[in-house]
Image: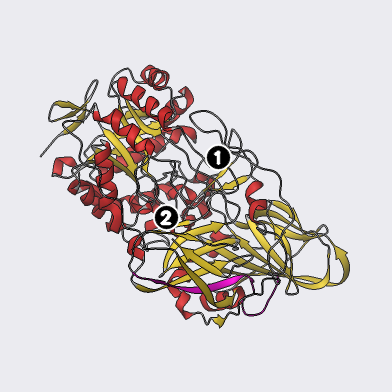
Amino acid sequence: MAGFVVGDGDFLLDGRPVRLLSGALHYFRVHEGQWGHRLATLRAMGLNCVETYVPWNLHERVPGGFADVEAVGRFLDAVAAAGMWAIVRPGPYICAEWENGGLPHWVTGPLGRRVRTDDAEFMGQVERWFRRLLPQVVARQIDRGGPVVLVQAENEYGSYGSDRAYLRRVVGLLHACGVTVPLFTSDGPEDHMLTGGSVPGVLATANFGSGAREAFAVLRRHRPSGPLMCTEFWCGWFEHWGAERAVRDPGDAADALREVLECGASVNIYMAHGGSNFGGWAGANRSGGLHEGALRGTVTSYDYDAPVDEAGLPTEKFRRFREVLARYAEGPLPEVPAPPVRIGGAVAAAVDGWAPLAEVLEVLGDEEVAAPVPPTFEELGVDRGLVRYRVDVPGPRRPYPLSVSGLRDVAVVTVDGVRAGVLAAEEAVLADPVAGPAVVELWVESLGRVAYGPRLAEPKGITGGVRHERQYLHGFRARGLRLDAVGEGGGKVAFRAVQPRAADAPAEGGGDDGVGAAAARSGGAGAARPWGGDAEGTGAVGPPGGPGPGGAGGGAPGLYRAVAEIAAPGDAALELPGWTRGFVWVNGFCLGRYWSAGPQQSLFVPGPVLHAGSNEVWVLELERGGEDVRLG
């Protein structure tokens, strides 16, 4: 079997110097039926290696409830079949702009800031997870005939903490679980990040998007020997709801890649192919230089302005990168694969069924919990989805302001069954005062848990309280509606027939995008892009819009159904004209969140999800629904 080791200046494969020309492709962001095509496309770009994270929370959604951990092994087998090496980054924390940085909500909920430290309870959970996961990796290491050449210990820890004992524990646990290929860490090329995130005896690497010579000079101050590697060469960037598109000039990115390789370094292009945040797994960030500002949810598309776009198509950046990488290839590059098949033409499917949110919750929701104060999503066991909070305002009493503290993240509020507004700030006050007695409902949605920075592990839901004037309201009834429950049980919902709305009778409530852009824009200025320049943010929260109660549908919140007739399956883009904010399933497969706030205007539908004939689409609309869905 081959031996892959870290040499004084190079990676060595059976004693021969090799350079890793790697690209990030996350198996969980690409439909399994399309792994082969994407890998072949990356191979044709000139890559000899593929990197993937492993999100713990995807595979263990409830304690001990492991789900398809074997997907990791199947992906690594696909990498080997493509004739490529593999880099695995198992965390336990991964960032990746993924929900909660990959950590399960049932871990971060009770432990809070104890995660990512040498805390006995946290490390006990990590060990249990690693012993379930790592056999998939260990059996496929290069010294056992597989493709895996490197495994990462933790992830960008120097951007978060300084617990050296924790890092040593993670390294020791990886070895104890059978990892024999070299381990590595990756951090920003800054002194405090490298000192906080590196481990003696473990290869240290750097993450950056430009300025390779300067970055490697900093790395060399900390590690005078060993291979140089940029583990995350940021060739593009991710996007937030309500912000502008993130685009990097292909020529600029190719020049920066060339500089990395001219330094004699190995590289992992992040992302080579980004894919999609299916299932509502997109995370969030906090704005500001120290990542402590307003929440900014990540969009469903993880296109990343990568050389291979979200639909698997080569871009101009692909062609520029291929020219750079061809100089370092051993022999001619493979031909670029043919593009995936798309559906034959545009298809519009009118909504034919609707069920109000309250009925959906009654059929698919978790058990209602009564508590003096509002329980968080974590306390209710809700990872992705929404929670209905009910509380009574005592009376009689005159109207007073109704306020919510610690709101994470958006609440649609009704008073005695009548829509009263949308709240979209952590400290929020309803526009109109509320008199008592009254029954208040707050339908609270998480826009994604923070994936990076000091606000990691913060809870979701109403994390403070609800006040009437200065008085806290007590006696809450809370009930969760998890996205997984909708995907698994949507067929149990009794849909009512929908009558098309007249052209002059829009859904009540006004507002083109409801809370839409308002909640998204509350994030303020966009995060700085790593190659220079800023992603512009927008203004403050504006007035809420969206529907009030209507007839059977009529644009009101709820679960909508449409059936799309397709002659032959293929990739497609799903558009929702006139809809506001929610989630979409196609044949039971959750595409993720849509939001009229933009910048994303459509959702990618993988061809393997569709089939010839009738395809059922469910839309969980949380504000104002439309009349049809469109595939093209």
**Picture layout, residue 475 above or below residue 275:** below
Q: Could you say where residue 513 lies in the image, as x and y percent from the top left?
A: 65, 58
Question: How did the renderer colour the structure?
Answer: secondary structure
Q: Is residue 67 visible?
A: no
Q: Which mark is residue 57?
A: 2
- Position of residue 325 measured from the top left corner of the image (x, y, whole percent): 27, 30
Badge 1 amino acid: Pro
Q: Is residue 23 visible?
A: yes
User: In the rendering, which numbered label is found on residue 454?
Assistant: 1
Classify 332 as above or below 581.
Answer: above
What is the quadrant of the N terminus in the image? top left
Q: Position of residue 188 (x, y in %)?
A: 44, 29
Q: What percent of the width, then of the height, locates residue 49?
A: 25, 38
Q: Is residue 552 magenta?
A: yes
Q: Residue at x 64, y 66 (%)?
A: 624
**Which range is magenta?**
548-567
Residue 333 located left or right of residue 421? left
Q: Is residue 620 above or below residue 40?
A: below
> Is residue 403 highlighted in magenta?
no
Q: Is residue 584 left or right of residue 433?
A: left
